[in-house]
Amino acid sequence: MSLLELHDVSMIYGSVKALQGIDLTVEKGEWLALMGPSGSGKTTLMNIIGCMDKASTGSIVLDGVDFTNVTAGNLTMLRRDKIGLVFQQFHLIPYLTAVENLMVAQYYHSMPDEQEALVALERVGLKERARHLPSQLSGGEQQRVCIARALINYPMLILADEPTGNLDETNAKIVLEFFQQLHREGHTIIMVTHDPKVAELAERCIVLEHGRIANRKDRRIVCREEEVS
Amino acid sequence: MTKYSMYTKMIWNALLRRRSRMLIALLAVAIGATVVSGLVTIYYDVPRQMGREFRSYGANLLLTPAGDQQVMTQNLVANATTLLPSDKLIGIAPYLYDRIKLNEQPFLVAGTHFQAVKKVSPYWQIRGEWPVDQSEDIVIGAEVAERLEIEPGQQVTLAVAGNETEKKVKVAGILRTGGSEENFIFLDLSLLQQMLKKEGVISIAQVSITANEAELNTLTQQIGEQVPGVAPRLVKQVTQSEQTVLGKLQALVYLVTIVVLLLTLICVATTMMAVVTERRKEIGLKKALGAENRSIIFEFLGEGLALGALGGLLGTVLGFFFAQAVSVNVFGRMISFQPLIALLALVVSIAVTGLACLIPVKIATEVEPAIVLRGE
C-alpha cells in the first residue's frame, strides 16, 4: 500500500482553480521533488497534503486513512501525528531557545522531553547551541533546528517547502546532506524546490503548471532524471 | 518536563523575552491598577477624612433639656455621653446661658469649658488668649468689645441682676466668629453657675462627633430612649451638607474609577490585538505543529492573566503610595494599608486584562495554519 494517494484532487477559490484533477501516489521511503513556476499550485498542494487545508473535491489517503471529509479537529490530529514540516523561512519561535522550539512540537504532540530534544539537536550537530535563541543562530543552524523539530515526533511524511531557499551554498549543502541521510534512513520526503540541482537528489520529480501535473512534453521545467533518460 | 511546566515556560518566555511590547501592556495595567487601587482607598477613606474636616465647622449634635425645661443637670448630660462612641467623639462643650451686667451694662452671657470649646468650635478666632478652665478670665464677643471699647488684658466688672455680688475679672481675649457669638460674654461654666447660684445645671451641650447622618440618627434615638430629661437634636444643616458633599465626592471617585477601568480595558485590548497581529505567523506555526484552538486560547489567556497579575501587583503597591500622597497632601493625615482593597485591585486587574484578551484571543483562534507555507 502506498503511503500517500491523491485521486482527482481539485482546489477552487471562488473562480480561481488553484489545483485541478491531481492524481499522485507517493510510496513509503520515497523522495519526491515538486517543482513548478510561482502560482502553479505547489503551496496549495503542500497545504492539502500537510492537512492544513481541505481540498474542494477528490480524495486523499494518508497511511490508509482517508481524510477527504474529516473535521478540522481531526485534520489537526493527523497533521500532529503524521506530518513533519520544514519551512523555507524556518519559522522558529523567537522567544524560545533551540531546544525549547523542539519541545514545543513535543508539547503539542504528547509530552515535552528535554533529553530527547537534545538528542535530536545533537543529530543535526547543534547540541552545543541548544540554549541559544533563534536570533543567535545562523540561517543554516536555524534550518537544522527546523529539521530537528520536524523529526522530533517521528512523522511518516516530511514536507519541506524550499528548505534551502534562504540559505547560502555552504549551508544549503549541509541541509541537503541531512535530507539525503533521512532518505537513506527510510523517511518519506516531499520537497518543493525551484532548483533543479536540489530536485535531482530526489528519486522522482513532478512539475505543476496551472494547477495540473504537467506532461513531460508540455512543460517548461525539466527534471534532471528526465534529461538523463 | 511536564506539560504544565512547558506551558509556564512558554508564557513567561513570551512575556520576558518580548519586553518592549509587553512592557507597554504591563504599564497600562499597572497604571490602571494604581489609579483604581488609589481611588478605591480614597473612596473608602474620604468619609473618615472628610468627617474630621467637617468637624471644624462646629457641633453636629445638640443635647437640650427635654420638654419645656430651660435647663438640665450635668449628670444627665454625663449619662448621655456614655452612649457616644469614645473613638469618634471630638468633644462636648456645655453651655449655661443667662444675662449679666458688664461694667453696668446688660449683656447675654454663656458659661462653658473653654478647652472643650476649642475642640467643638475650632473656627473661633480669639484676639488675645484663650482663658484657662476654672480661671476667672473671660472672653467677650467682638460686638460687645467694640461697644464698650474693651481690649484684651483689661479688667472689667461682672454683676448679676438682683444680686449685689460683683466680680472683677480680666478679659483674656476678644472673640470673632462672624455669628451671634460676637454679642456674648463667655466665662468659665463653674464661675457662672456660682454667680447665678445654678450649680450643676446647663442650658445645652454641643457635641462634635465623626459620624454620618444615619449613625447620628441612631445615637439620637438611643439617647432619647435611654436618658429621659435630655432631648438630643441633630444640627441638620451641618449633617446634611456633610452627607451631600461626601456623596458627591464619592460619586466623583466612583465615576473616575469606572472611566480608568474602561481606559485600561481599551489599552490592554489594543496592545493584545497588536500582539496577536504581529504573532500571526507564530500562531499559524503552532497550529501547523498540531496546536488545537484550546491550546492557543490557554496560551494567550495565560499571557494576559500573568500580565494582569504582574501589573495588578505593581499597581496595588503604587496605588497605596498614591492614596497616601493624596491623603497627606489634601487631608494632612496618613492612611493605613487595606488588604481587602489590595486584593480587590489585584482581582480587578486580572479580570479586566482577561476581559481585554477575549477579542484578541478569538482572532488568534481564527488564524489558519496554512499561512506559514503561504509566507503571508
Image (cartoon, coloured by chain):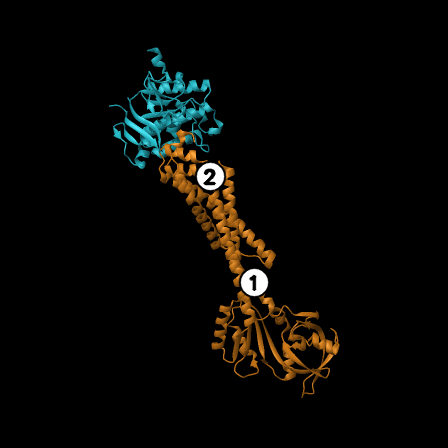
Chain colours: A cyan, B orange
Q: Is residue A128 left or right of residue B333?
A: left
Under mark 1, the amino acid is: Met
Report the chain holding disc 2: B
Label 2 sits on residue = B275
Residue A154 in view in this figure: no
Q: Nearer the viewer, residue A152 or A33?
A: A33
**Measuring 26% from the left and 30% from the top, which residue is drawn there?**
A65
Q: Is residue B70 left or right of residue A84?
A: right
Residue B55 image-quadrant placement: bottom right
Residue B374 image-quadrant placement: top left
- Report the disc number at residue B325: none
- Residue occupying the far front of the picture: A15
Looking at the rendered image, the disc whose residue lies closer to the viewer, 2 or 1, is 2
Report the chain holding disc 1: B
- Circle 2 Cα neighbour tier, 10 Å, few/some/many (<14 / 14–19 / ≥20): some
Q: Earlier in the sequence, mark 2 or mark 1?
A: 1
Element at label 1: helix
Label 1 sits on residue = B50
Residue B211 in the image: above or below residue B22: below
Residue A68 in view in this figure: yes
User: x, y (%) of residue B227?
Assistant: 50, 78
Element at label 2: helix
- Residue occupying the far top of the picture: A228
**Measuring 59% from the left and 59% from the top, which residue is drawn there?**
B331
- Residue occupying the far left of the picture: A1
Q: Is residue B155 left or right of residue A108?
A: right
The N terminus of chain B: image quadrant? top left
Under mark 2, the amino acid is: Val
Residue A114 image-quadrant placement: top left
User: x, y (%) of residue B194?
Assistant: 64, 82
